[in-house]
Structures are given as C-alpha cells and as structure tokens.
Amino acid sequence: MEIANKISNAVVAGVKELYGQDIAPESVQLQETRPEFEGNVTLVVFPYVKMSRKRPEDTGQEIGEYLVKQVPDVVARFNVVKGFLNLVIAPAQWIGLLEEINSQERFGFTKPTEESPLVMIEYSSPNTNKPLHLGHVRNNLLGWALANVMEANGNKVVKTNIVNDRGIHICKSMLAWLKWGNGETPESSGKKGDHLIGDYYVAFDKHYREEVKELVAKGMDEEQAKQEAPLIKEAHEMLVKWEQGDPEVRALWRKMNEWVYAGFDETYKALGVGFDKIYYESDTYLEGKEKVEEGLAKGFFYRREDGSVWADLTKEGLDEKLLLRSDGTSVYMTQDIGTAKLRFQDFPIDKMIYVVGNEQNYHFQVLSILLDKLGFKWGKDLVHFSYGMVELPNGKMKSREGTVVDADDLISTMIDDARQMSADKVNKLEDITEAEAKEIARIVGMGALKYFILKVDARKNMLFNPEESIDFNGNTGPFIQYTYARIRSILRKAEAQGIQRPEHLPTNAELSDKEISLIQHLNDFAAVVRQAGNDYNPSCIANYCYELVKEYNQFYHDFSVLKEEDSNKQIVRLALSEAVSKVVRNGLGLLGIEVPERM
RNA sequence: GCCCCUGUAGUUCAAUGGAUAGAACUACGGUUUCCUAAACCGCCAAUCCGGGUUCGAUUCCCGGCGGGGGUACCA
C-alpha cells in the first residue's frame, strides 16, 4: 500500500506538472504487471491521454520519465506497452514492505477503539421444530465470518441470534409427541434433542396429510380439508392455550425447547460459531405488538374494519403490509419490530446487519422503512446481508419432501472423510497420537466444509451435490491448510537449526520477480479485508487465501529455504514463508477456519 | 401480471471498466536421492442473444431469452 501511495502521489504531481490537470490520488489506476512484461506495478495511462493530447505511448513515456526523475528510490526504471506504463520498483522498497508485514501480528486489521461504531449482527435464527440443515450452515458460517470481518475493520461487534421458539410449528411437534411419543426423551432414545423434535414434526405432517386425504376422499375440497383436519385444529387449540399461558402447554413447550437448544448447541459448537446475546421470539412478539400500537397512535399505520393493522407503503413504491392479523396475533414483521426494540434498549447500536436468505429481500426492505418511521436511527441504513440459497441438483431443499441435507450428518461425514483421507496417505505423519489425528481430522474436515461454502460469493445461489463429497484437493480448505502445515514445518526446522530471521532484513538481498510478486500479494491482504467489510462479502478472503497459497506452492518447488547457501536469500525466503503462513492463518481465521500445525 | 436476484469451459467457482477471461474438478500425460506428493508441471475446453455508452465491456445502460426468489392475515 505504502508503495502504491507513493506512486499515486507522484503521478498526481506529474499530471499536474506535465498537463496542468488536477486528479485525485484514488483515481490513479495501478495494477500488478503481467508476468510477460518487465516491471512490478503498471499504471494505466488511458485516463490521461485526453489531458496530454498525445498518443497513449507518448503519454506513458512522459509520465514514466517524470516518475524516474522525481521518485528514483521507488521507481527504478520503466517501459511502455500500448497504454500501459510498467514500472520496475526498487528492490529495497519490497524488502521494507515484507519487513513491515512481518512486524505486525495482525497485518491488515484495524483495531476497534472506544469510538468505533457498534455493529450488531443477527444470524442463524433457527426455528425450534427441526434440526439445522445445510442452508442454516451457510447462514451460520457467513454470519460468523462477517462478524470477524467487521471486527477486523475496526468495528465493535455484537453477535446475536433470534430464536423462533413459538408458533404453530412448535405446537405441531408438541402435539405429535403427546400422541405418539410414549414419553420418549433424548436420553431414552439416544437421539439429539433437535432431531427428536424434528422427527415428531415429520410425524405430524405425515398423519395430517393422511387426514386431509381422507377428507378429500369423502368429497371435501382440498383447501377446506386442510383447515378442517382434526390434527391441525388441535394444533391451533394448543397455540391458543400457549398464548393464554396454559401451565401444562407451557411446561411441555419449555421442556421440548430445552431439548432442541441442547441439540443446537452441539451443532453450533461443531461449526465453531457463537453469540454474544440470544433473543427469543416468545419474549419479543408482545413488544412488537406494543410498538405497532404506538405507530398506530402516531398515525403511521391504520386499522381496517376487520381489526387488522396495516402499513401503507405505496408512497415508497411498495405494497401495503400486514402488521397485526384481524384476530390480534402478530406476524413475522411485528416480531422483528419487537426484537429491534429490545435490542436498542440493550445496546447503543450504530448499525444493524441481518444475515438472512435472499428470499426475504422484500421483508427487509419493508422492515427498514418501518423501523425508520418508528424512530430507530439505524433502521434506514440497516443492512440485509442477503445470501443465496443452497440448491441441490434437483432444486431447492424442501423439508417436507425430505430433500434436506442435515447439518450434523454433513459435519460428521466431512470429519470421517478427512480421517479416511489421512489414513490413505503414503507419507502420513508417523509420530502422531490418536488424539492428535482426531483433532487434525476435525480441523481439516471442517475446513473443507467451511471453505466450500465461504468461497462462493455470498449473494449467489450455490449448488451442493450430496452424491459427490466435498473435495480435499484443488481450490479447497485442506489445500490451504496443507500448505500452512508445510510452512510451519519449515519454520520449525529452521528454528531447530538455529536459523533466525533478524528484525531487519538485509536491504541488499536479491529478489526474483516471483518473490516480488509474492510480496505484492501479501500486501494485498489489507485491501482484501477492507473490501470484504465494505461489500459485506467474505468470499474474497477465501479466494485470496487460495491464490496466495497456490503462488507459494509454486515457489516451494523452485527454491529451498533451509538449503539455500546465500544467507541473505535464505533469510528473505524464511521471512516470506513466515509472512505467508501468518497471512493465511489470519485470513482463514476471519472465515472461522482453523489451521493445523501439521497434517 | 408486477418486483428483486441471476446467466462465464462438460461440472463447481473467479475476474476495482484494462493487456491473451483465470482456477479447480473430470480425462489424458509427466515430476519424488530434495524443507510433508493432501504437492508440482503439461494438455483439451467458456463470457445466453441483440443493441448502446467507452480509447477499451464478462463487468455499466436498454431490449429479448433462460434459471431462482418474492408478491398483503406462513415464518
């Protein structure tokens, strides 16, 4: 960055002196020089041809001459190809840059201060009637990664989760459990609590559909049958009892939710995600109603004849939106308003980020307007971090059709596969304990899963094929982890041999083009972290880590570190290796991917 | 119908408006006396179609076509 700044400023001065025009330093377009040309940094000169009124080649020549004259310690020499001015940077600059990268443990990160804005990130937000699936996994990994990225960009971050713990869906599970459960518990069955509840949800649906089918066979039309089926009526009665605070229903609800939470906690732990503050819908939905009444009193909303409450957003180019049903019960929007109220009471939020799938884009557009009207200062600029769906080869995941990829199954499969993979390797580590092997399999298996999901642009839908297991070779987490482990091995051996990297690198050390290019890429890390924060998109970090490691790997076969005779070169290579391992560790760390010291 | 997102090798993914659009997987062929072969190298292969803006468009704008999502008492 430092080098780019120096060049940018010099170009600004040059354009001023040569052509008498003022340009902004940020507008200067610099890029890495293509390997087929001599140079390290390339200035795109097309923007200046209008000012110079000369051919691109001549313009480049003039600017190049100016740079060599004015900043000789930075720009050693140059050449011009078409409209591209290729600059050769003085080697000492690169050494200085490498030294700087190595001197900072958290290179590229900005530390939050007391004055930093407080960003709250909501993610995960599960329903308590079924276990987590692959879609939730994407949500959780993105939420966690984004929280890390925001923090690395100098924000104070509060991670939060809103648990949808009430509603008709939970009543369905409860009812099924009462009818067919025979008192089954997680302990008695050996099932994880969330899976147990999920099974009863499925059981409800199965019996319910049978009932509907019977009614239809008797001549009732399908819509009516869906309303009239005894099971659904019973579930509704249970929901009413719940709302009335019926002790028995509430006790059962509490018990079964506890089972689910215990199950979720296991999954969260395996995924390596967590929260600073958890909200429950059962606590927030009444707050939402209150807030809506308040808005009604202030004239933001209106009540229809049937008693339902609406927001008219036609002026904003949207539709009218229901806020309270005619029977007075709350809807999704109401609950989100209530949750916002509690959150604002609990924290001085400057910015709110909701990690929620893109199927709810419209919902958040509306929520933003409503919160703004209701006086939440961050409402207008709330961020809906809208990520794409995970699709299966035959379409979307649908729990009713049994086409869901269960999170727990997927996690254990990945870890088992990683274990299998290392067992198959010819050169597997010998002096390894069982516990260590297990831990490595966990890190690698989870690394493969997390990277697979996080490398994809969050906004886009992505495809997961359950038939093909997630790869461990190529553009994958394990590939990066493996390189990291090898570098660590080199560093351990260097230390054992008493080879030390001095604080200041030898300024006269020679650098190859590839080494310079690697330093440039290391330096890019800071910009990538910033970009991830600005775009709310962690995927660029994943792809960056891959590129960096791939480049290092190519080196690895070209040069030796420990066997290099020239001590200056050896020290530089050691420093490079150390920098790569550090940047990769920090980069993957932002994504929630761990690195093994050996594998 | 209306609104939003999206379209890149056989497949899964990249590419601040910049030079010859990159990887990976798959197929085939090489490379271990050498810091961990979960590696490296080689080879085949793509911007949905038509306009526009620009010195320059996968990228921005308009129009088609294809895919996904949303659309007022589900969450």
Image (cartoon, coloured by chain):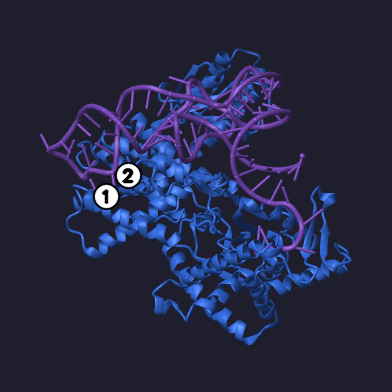
Chain colours: A blue, B purple
Of A489 and A342, nearer the camera is A342
Q: Quadrant of residue B54 in the image?
A: top right
Residue A543 locus on image (x, y percent) = 45, 42
- Estimate how packed mark 2 is, as few (under 14), some (14 to 19) or many (20 or more) residues with alpha carbons within 10 Å: many
- Marks 2 and 1 sit apart, C-alpha to C-alpha, by 8 Å
Residue type pointed to by label 2: Ser
Residue located 41% across and 79% down the image? A187
Q: Chain of mark 2?
A: A
Of A470 and B57, nearer the camera is A470
Residue A387 locus on image (x, y percent) = 58, 50
Of A13 and A290, nearer the camera is A290
On the image, numbered disc 2 is attached to which residue? Answer: A577
Horizontally, residue A173 falls left or right of residue A543, namely: right
SS at mark 1? helix
Residue located 48% across and 44% down the image? A393
On the image, numbered disc 1 is attached to which residue? Answer: A491
Label 2 close to label 1 by CB (< 8 Å): yes
Residue type pointed to by label 1: Leu
User: Disc 2 or 1, which lies upstream in sequence?
Assistant: 1
Q: How many marks?
A: 2
- Estimate how packed mark 1 is, as few (under 14), some (14 to 19) or many (20 or more) residues with alpha carbons within 10 Å: many
SS at mark 2? helix
Of A167 and B19, nearer the camera is A167
Q: Which mark is residue A475?
A: none
Q: Chain of mark 1?
A: A
Residue A562 locus on image (x, y percent) = 21, 42
Can you see residue A342? yes
Residue A467 locus on image (x, y percent) = 39, 47
> From what the image shows, is residue A255 above or below residue A103?
below
Horizontally, residue A451 falls left or right of residue A415, namely: right
Q: Could you confirm whether marks 2 and 1 are on the same chain?
A: yes
